[in-house]
Amino acid sequence: MNTIFPEFQHRNDSVCSKDVAEPARSLTDFFRNRRNVVFWILILTLSFWFSPVWVSAQFAPTLSTSFDNLEAGLPSGFSQSAFFAEGEEGPASLVVNFDRGSFSFAGYSPGQTIGGLVVDLFVPSPILTVEGLIIAEVQVISVGPNSLNANAVVTEVTGNVLPGLAFLGIPDPTGATAFNITYTDLPGDSGAVMDVSDAGSLPLSGALGFNVPLVWNTPAILTHSPFGGDLQVQTTLTSSSGLQVIAEETFSLSGGIAPPQPVNSLNCAVAGESVQLSWQNSGDYASLEISRNGSSLATVVGDATGFVDTSPEPGLNEYEVRGILLGLPSAPAACSSEVSIPVNLVSLPSLQAFPGESLQMPISASLELPTEGFSIPISYDPALFVLESADLQGTDAVGAEFFLVETDAIAGLTNVFLIFDSEDVDHIPSGTDRTLCRLLGSVLPTVASGSNITLSLPATAGLPPVSAVIVQNNGAGYSPARTDGQIDVQGVPVNAFQRADANSDALVDLADAIFILDFLFSGAAEPTCQNAADANDDDQLNVADAIQVLDTLFGGGSPLPAPAGGECLPDPTPGNLGCLQGACP
């Protein structure tokens, strides 16, 4: 077999023919050039250090949590330091559960920063050591009463990390979303959750070709429990293939005050279609809170020793009573009772919508008996959804004598009340497919695609509290079973458009200029997206818009105002014109 490098052969080797020796000498000359040798060694070295390591799935990250302070009742920032080893799988998500305390989002609004992320890369090799930081800011997307959504956006890459990523074919991540984060505050002092998921812009999926140290820093949105004692932090890390590692950490809070003692001798007794609660107070309380099946039911004065639930749920009802003093709740006292009452169900649908889309959502019901009226609270995140009104059009409650809608837009709470016939002659018929009313609302245009919005039907909500009640049986009120509604937000906003796409066919061409002229001078239909037809963005529709289209297409005129050049977005310069329905490619 002929060797590739003829200088390694005996000079009298007659096997090498002239036509074989020439290309061999050419290769020899190439590899004698030291710069080329260094280049190829560098490429091979980087390939070794940066290429994914194909091994059987392993996932054994290390993690630790730290706090700015551990003082009971005080706010504290916190950080999570994680290490993902070379050859093991990278992270797909990180969920942090605090079992005590609460999150506060006061003062935060979309666009603000709420912490940051640092990935500290150090990849040694014989020829080139890749070293530097990938830095991301956590930017607020939306804020609700009990939740905050944010994205970790890469803002800076230091050292020589960018050349290393470029070699792997990974684009510069600056400006890209690295992670999606949801912060959720749980009721009362029961804790909070931080949920982080990989957005895919960093090379973290599959087996890692290098070590990944990662640090999350979060400002003082966590307020520690005022009671002192131990804080349990559970962090669940999930790999890109679904492997999980759970880290449990315990921190001792200093200081704190003792909560009041719980009530004694709590008893639940069924009285007809109601439940009578009675108890003995073990001390002084400012008030007492009563819950049923995990939802708040009522707040009564501190010296009360009983309460009557006039609209229990069918089947098992589990009650808890807590004494409140100086804003601190006691441990709960519990009892339960089984109630045989009519079984009713109210529900909201699950559907898909675009950002900015208007929706009609019926409140459906399964009614065991003819129904005389109802009250139903609906809660939602006002940073994601606005409930504009409710009506009875096309429902089984058309002709009702009294119908009232109350909305607290800041709290994200709407209550609907109905009395069908005060003389109790006519009713909403019983049945499994009844419609009580129709909700009219819309997804906010700023909601990101992929978000999920819950329209909740709580048992009780608001101050003063309003309970979900179905009125049947000559004025008796029954608490129904409830199914929440879900809105899966997908796609671009309905008012997104391309500048000059006047006929909304997702193209900018001669037909758009003709469409504008037909509308202006021939009585043709009005554009469904006026902003798109406003080609020169002067907030007017006139012949200058048609000229702008023609000039851009054929006259080499100035570029179209944004959104243009492949962009499809809501109007960045809103004015008098609107866009009922845009079109994107």
Image (cartoon, rainbow, N blue to C red):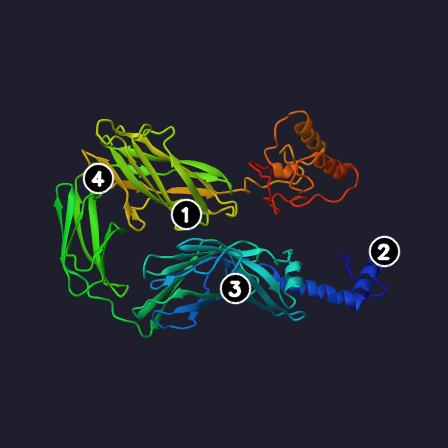
User: Reading the chain from its start, which is encountered first: label 1 or label 2?
Assistant: 2
Q: Which mark is residue 116?
A: 3
Q: With 318 as the anchor, is 227 left or right in this view? A: right
Hey, what amino acid is under mark 3?
A: Gly
User: Reading the chain from its start, which is encountered first: label 4 or label 1?
Assistant: 1
Circle 1 sits on which residue?
409
> CA–CA distance between discs 1 and 3?
31 Å
How many neighbours does mark 4 have within 10 angstroms: few (below 14), some (14-19), or many (20 or more)? many
Q: Residue at x 17, y 61 (%)?
A: 263
Cβ atoms at labels 1 and 3 below 8 Å apart: no
- What percent of the width, then of the height, locates residue 478? 22, 40
Q: Nearer the viewer, residue 6 or 427?
A: 427
Q: Kindly indicate the quadrant of the structure image that contains residue 155.
A: bottom right
Q: Is residue 585 visible?
A: no
Circle 4 sits on which residue?
477
- What percent of the width, then of the height, locates residue 421? 25, 30
Find numbered disc 4 in the image and state the secondary structure of the residue it sits on.
strand
Hey, what amino acid is under mark 1?
A: Ala
Q: With 69 as the anchor, is 494 left or right in this view? A: right
Q: With 424 as the anchor, is 124 left or right in this view? A: right
